[in-house]
Image (spheres, rainbow, N blue to C red):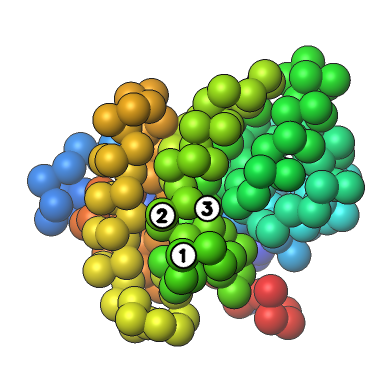
Amino acid sequence: MPSRVEQISVNLAAVRDRIARACDAAGRGRDEVTLIVVTKTYPAEDVRTLAGLGVRHVAENRDQDAAPKAAACAELPLTWHFVGQLQTNKVRSVVRYADHVHSVDRPRLVAALSGAAVAAGRPLGCLVQVALDAESGDRGERGGVAPDAVGPLADAIAATDGLRLDGVMTVAPLAGRYAGQPRAAFDRLVEISSRLRETHPAANMVSAGMSQDLDEAVAAGATHVRVGTAVLGVRPGLR
Ligand SMILES: *Cc1c(COP(=O)(O)O)cnc(C)c1O
């Protein structure tokens, strides 16, 4: 049996190789894509291992798990990303460790994040989560705003104290016209990102692609891929 560290090391090398190949195939530089390892459900020990292997970006999706883990890893040179659906009563905790929240999807959350970020004295990077399966006016099954609501929400973030507009994020939809079409979904996200950068040129993060579809995301132009399973293994339970 390989040790946990060996296992993670082998998986990480394979994922880095996939990213490098996808960059090559797309004529993109390897430095145009940042790997964020999603450490949800895995212990602080694994986060420590990842940091030792050169990972600099990790993500979590539940504050209850993330807050103690981030505290246990506070001395490591890591940037923490929050990628889960976020309740306003959790934002005070999240802004203490998170540098970026990828799942901003409503004005009330913008207001709550602003208040908390200002109080914590830590500026917070925000990405608008786009639900490509949501109709105008609706929210997505797994969070996110419909494409036509991205502009107004982005404007609100950019105009709000304590927050910085970093870009857009999506999860490839399981239903609707993009189901089973991750490349088309990510192309659409990149189009939305280009429109957004006409008015917010610094909002250049495009967060897309997970273990299954990171290659398509890199091909489409993602700047950040969020990979859990392919690095750390299949999570027990569905999350
Ligand atoms: C869990 C999760 C990921 C990683 O998914 P894997 O399939 O394990 O790579 C990426 N993004 C979000 C928002 C997640 O919740």
Q: Are marks 2 and 1 in contact (CB under 8 Å)?
A: yes
3 vs 2, front mark: 2
1 vs 3, front mark: 1
10 Å neighbourhood of mark 2: few (<14), some, or many (≥20)? some
Q: Which type of secondary structure does the marked residue at label 2 adopt?
A: helix
Q: Which residue is mark 3?
A: 129
- Coordinates of residue 199 in the picture (x, y in percent): 34, 27
Foreground residue among 186 and 9: 186
Residue depicted at 46% across the width and 47% down the height: 150
Tell me if residue 194 comes above or below residue 83 in the rendering: above
State the mark number for residue 148.
2
Q: Amino acid at mark 2?
A: Asp
Q: Which residue is mark 1?
A: 136
| Image quarter in which the C terminus is found | bottom right
Q: Earlier in the sequence, mark 1 or mark 3?
A: 3
The image quarter in which residue 233 lies: bottom right
Residue depicted at 74% across the width and 53% down the height: 86
Q: Separation of disc 3 and disc 2 at Cα? A: 12 Å
